[in-house]
Image (cartoon, helix red, strand yellow):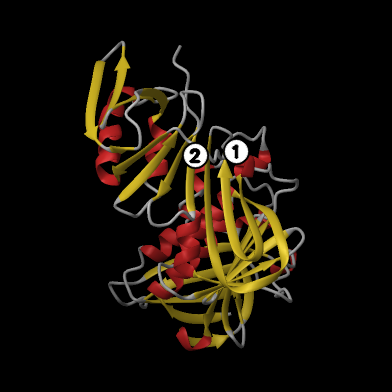
Amino acid sequence: MKFSINKNTILEELTNVSRAISAKNIIPILNGIKFELGKEGLLLTASDSNLTIRSLIPRDKIESIESEGIIIITSKILLDIIRKMPTNIINFEVIDDFKIAIYSGNSESDNYRNYSLNCLNSMDYPEIDFDDSKNHINIKSSKLKEMINQTIFAISDQPSRPLLTGLNIKINGNCLECVATDSYRLAKKNINLEETYDDSVNIVVPGNNINELSKILSDDDSNVEIHIYPKKIMFKFKNLAFQSNLLNGEYPNTSNFIPTEFTHIVTANLKNLYDTIDGAALLTLGKEKNIVKMDLSNNELIVSSYSSETGKAENKLTVKRNVTEPVSISYSAKYMLEALNSFNEEEVVLFMNTDSKPIVIKNIKDESLIQLILPIKTY
């Protein structure tokens, strides 16, 4: 295998596929990236057996090809090597079955760099199936990216409850729903698909994997195909295939978690509310629960925090309310700020009852996004 390619072209695709390589991987061959140069172009594949990412660089985007072939490059510093190459064109040349030379320029130039990296036998790399499903879903990349970012932060990081470390994806007809919860908060987003999906879906995708997907997705209207299988899910977009295993088990039914009746309804400017809570939370930074207290009386909202080491903070904000009765609720400032950060509109609405009932946050113009936070008892 011998070819030359533009530095930025291969760097972008290697950055994408390398997201599938895990630092905890104990299978040596999966610590490498598979380079497969053939008739269609250069196929790059990386996997940790739970997540697999494959990217195709078309043949017309490769500067020159002298010979085709397959090799597994295992160096952990491969990306750094390419990043620091001084020229725009980089050469790859297999110099024996298990070694590859990566170089720029020529031996007589000032820009000459030459690295010789050890490789592994491509015959040992596992066969990975990327076949399309018979019935797939189409969605715009920007919508899918936004949907993930508006929910993924609410997943659990506790391995004792593995299903809660994933993102629950449901499809019924033309409705796509994403839900994440760590049992202390919940994020839920619905969107309507352009087409109706024949089969109902209720799956859980590992949170770490779906988070890596959101980093690769573009903020444009390019199409993403979602292919769902009994034990895995595949996202195909542009020249890339992103395939993840699913978590086993049935995700909790969260529909009953969200109250439908509320005593206190508060409308506030999103930025002003965020800044009010963020400012009061400064005294609780580093604390385990990051607790702030919210007091409502008439049209005044007061957010306060207290630290025995630092002191007390109190911030006020004028809001709109449906009732004038006072209410006091304490909650995690971190959870509230992350929930508020998922909204894009100018105003949000807080729906509340008592200091022991969930706080629900919605958008005035669009109720497809719901955030829920449980209060914290401070006595």
Quarter where residue 138 is shown: bottom right
Mark seen at residue 215: none
Mark seen at residue 257: 1
Residue 267 appears left or right of 206: left
N-term-proximal mark, 2 vs 1: 1
**Crowding near the residue tagged with mark 1, few <14, some 14–19, many ≥20 C-alpha atoms within 10 Å:** few
Residue 84 vertical placement versus 157 (above, below): below
Whether residue 63 is visible here, answered yes or no, is: no
Which amino acid does the dot numbered 2 rest on?
Answer: Leu
Which amino acid does the dot numbered 1 rest on?
Answer: Phe
Element under disc 1? helix
Residue 302, position as x, y percentages in the image:
27, 26
**Crowding near the residue tagged with mark 2, few <14, some 14–19, many ≥20 C-alpha atoms within 10 Å:** many
Residue 182 vertical placement versus 14 (above, below): above
Mark seen at residue 372: 2
Q: Residue at x 30, y 76 (%)?
A: 109
Whether residue 184 is visible here, answered yes or no, is: yes
Q: Residue at x 35, y 54 (%)?
A: 344
Residue 149, position as x, y percentages in the image:
46, 53
Task: Say if mark 2 contacts mark 1, CB within 8 Å.
Answer: yes
Residue 71 vertical placement versus 158 (above, below): below
Closer-to-camera residue (347/7): 347
Closer-to-camera residue (209/5): 209
